[in-house]
Image (cartoon, rainbow, N blue to C red):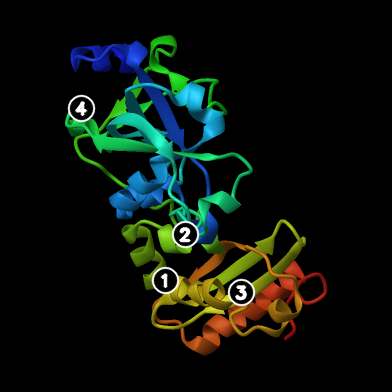
Amino acid sequence: MLLFTDLLMKAGFSPADVRLLRHQTKGRNGKTPYILWRDQLAAFEDYQHVQTASNRASIAAPIWASFVVPPSGGTLFAGLYSARRVGPAEDGWIDPLQGVPGSTLTSHDLDRYDTERLTNLADYTGRLWIELGSGTRSWIQRADRQNKPICELTRTFREDAFPGYTHFLARISELQGLPATWVTALSAARGVYLLTSSRTREQYVGSAAGVNGFFGRWLNYAQDGHGGNLGLRSSEPSDYQVSILEVCGSSSTQDDIVAIEQLWKRKLQSREMGLNRN
């Protein structure tokens, strides 16, 4: 079995000099470190180079091996970085993940590190997956004490495969970060969907009959929280989970889709026990 420490040593690094950083915090508007790394590498590196002073001892090492967590889970190698603490973070630094000043997110001081992406193991970036084991809560780990098995190595970077309409689940805040292939699939299909809120325990049945299908309809909720629906307007704001109840054929008219929507409202009693008002 090939271990990540084996790879580090073959690249000329002492595992004692390396810290494993697994970035998995979810930010505002559904952003994650994975999405930053995939779509805005400079923003990901800006996010990474500022750390709270409380992490100073555990993160102190000349080399960081960065990992990110895709929507389906797992631990994907995002690259090796040299790292050196240079002092406090600049006043007014905006956290790229949260979109607000970093000083408002913690009571600890913020440290700034000079980081530089290294070419060592660059060919494995976005292709190598490790098995993290039981230490998922510890996002900083010492490489010399953690022999992480390499569980997958792909030929090229690949997005998670679309799970299919039946198995698709996401939150409204996550829509903007979905892989392009998922967006294409969701934009091409029309039908009936379900919104549910784990916070308010409410549900809403809706239909997508427009040219941009499910995805286009759901973007309305991402923009204003209610998509023009009276029931959602009257409810407490929530980051709804979206799922698909039924996909309608390409020959279905808007009236056909509305009729199926009404049937699902009766099945789920979403007028009596939900947010539907018609």
Q: Which mark is residue 225?
A: 3
Say if residue 74 shows up in the picture. no
Mark 2 or 4 closer to N-term?
Answer: 4
Which residue type carries mark 2?
Tyr
Q: Quadrant of residue 243?
A: bottom right
| Disc 4, SS | loop
Query: Left or right: where does residue 2 sit relative to residue 268?
Result: left
CB of mark 1 within 8 Å of CB of mark 2? Answer: yes
Mark 3 or 1 closer to N-term?
Answer: 1
Residue at mark 4: 121
What's the distance in space between the residues labelled 3 and 2, CA to CA? 23 Å
Q: Quadrant of residue 185?
A: bottom left
Residue 238 rendering spot, x and y as whole percentages: 67, 65
Quarter in which the C terminus is drawn? bottom right
What's the distance in space between the residues labelled 1 and 4, CA to CA? 40 Å
CB of mark 3 within 8 Å of CB of mark 2? Answer: no
Residue at mark 1: 189
Residue at mark 2: 165
Residue situated in front as seen by the camera: 50 or 45: 50
| Residue at the spot 53% in from the left edge and 71% down from the top edge | 222
Residue situated in front as seen by the camera: 44 or 1: 44
Say if residue 23 shows up in the picture. yes
155 is higher (above) or lower (below) than 19? below
